[in-house]
Image (cartoon, rainbow, N blue to C red):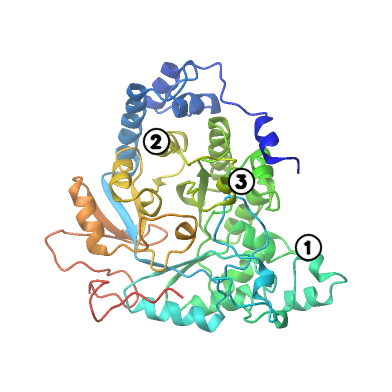
Amino acid sequence: MSDPAEAVAAFDHVPETDQQFENALAKARDGHRLTVDDGVELLTTGTDRAGIDPVRKERVLEAADRRRAEVAGDDVTFVANLNNNVTTACDTGCLFCNFKDRASAFETDAPDDHGGFTKTPADSRRAVEEALDSGIYEVCSVSGLHPAFALDADHRELLEAADDPERLNYRSPEAYTTSPGTYAEQIRAMSVDGVHVHSITPEEAYHARRGTDRSYESVYRRLREAGLDSVPGTAAEILVDEVRDVICPAKIDTDEWLAAMEGAMAAGLPVTATIMYGHVETEMHRVMHLKRIRDLQDRTGGITEFVPLSFVHERTPLYEQGLVDGGASDAEDELMIAVSRLFLDNIEHIQTSWAKFGDEKSLKTLSCGADDFMGTLLSEEITKRAGGDHGEFRSVADYVDMVTAIGRRPVERSTDYERRRPIDPADTPHGPRLGPRADGTPMLDPSRSPPADD
């Protein structure tokens, strides 16, 4: 790859359109399907002037909030969930990430001072067992691409027999202090007592089929047999390859990500979709990304929610190398939520993130088009390692307090949105009730302690 700064300066896709802001806003208000140019006009509050116009911005937010009420109502949903990331070992080298540690640091003869971790399947099972006693019913697992990971025993046998396993980013588990096992073993370990397992991103699925001609559908069917229930559509970042070539050149490209998502849905698994914005991309890239998500949903219908993820920059290589001097502004975050709601006319739910935004700002975005408020996130790691400082845990009581403060109704929901439990603020104490071991006891009750973050 050429110098990243030169690549950014040479982007082909810039925020220029032949559309006018007022026309785009009128289309959005009338419920017409938006074009990419429409989306760019709304996201920039008009390409006819520099910067974000505060008056125009509020008009976009108002239109999005009205659409949210029409499509999703006034409920604000959340899940009681655990983050159980298996390993930080990863050699992909994404410039926006500070979650990973070089895989060589985990080898048996390396000093044990890298600060990362790898969990065995038994470790993962223990973490889920403990969290179930806190009332959770979803475990979300997104991990680094440890070279010793394989799909299952058959896949490991093929990788071990390869002429040049390291060319496939594979090394035997014996080379490492701790083996992560296989993806199938980890999913089976986390599939405890009916908990919903939300795991295996497109990037992880690519890792789980390397060195073979297996389809994504067959990989996801194998993992579904092991207990996988749904797939997080992360690793999307920006689905425009000239951006990916800068921020994650070793990662799968746009077409590969889309193929993996289609494979997951063909295997009968619902998925989410994301965007990670606020770094080197332009507003045109952001809306091109939205268009690719909308087209995917048109083809498949399996995306349950869209999750805009604002780039947290403080401890990332992009920031350290001077390619960015910060993340998205408050106005950009609000408009990203709003335009996602207006552009993605075939996806019902838009999520906001207290882990990215903090409480006050995330509550504001619930009036910009978002209707889902994330989850309890026991043991959140990824945002924290990138420099996020908005905490790692929210209780059901926290959700009730925050959501009722803005005059909306808090609703505990399942991962797939099929089960919902509206919460009466007067019905105290507040605790989860949808989990296999949940009985309404508060998650921070002395008899229920969140699992230690190891």
* In-front residue for pair 389/32: 389
Which numbered disc flags the more N-terminal residue, 2 or 3? 3
Q: Residue at x 67, y 69 (%)?
A: 103
Q: Residue at x 37, y 48 (%)?
A: 357
For label 1, the residue is 213
Left or right side of 100 for 68? left
Q: Residue at x 64, y 77 (%)?
A: 111
For label 3, the residue is 321
> Quarter-wise, where is residue 330 in the image?
top left
* In-front residue for pair 14/321: 321
Q: Nearer the viewer, mark 1 or mark 3?
A: 3
**Image x and y of residue 229, in percent:** 50, 66
Which numbered disc flags the more N-terminal residue, 1 or 3? 1
Residue 454, visible in the rendered structure: yes
Residue 338 is labelled as 2
Q: Amino acid at mark 1?
A: Asp
Q: Nearer the viewer, mark 2 or mark 3?
A: 3
Residue 205 is labelled as none
Which numbered disc flags the more N-terminal residue, 1 or 2? 1
Q: Residue at x 36, y 22 (%)?
A: 56
**Residue 390 sits above or below residue 35 on the image:** below
CA separation in Å, label 1 and label 2: 40 Å
Q: Amino acid at mark 3?
A: Gln
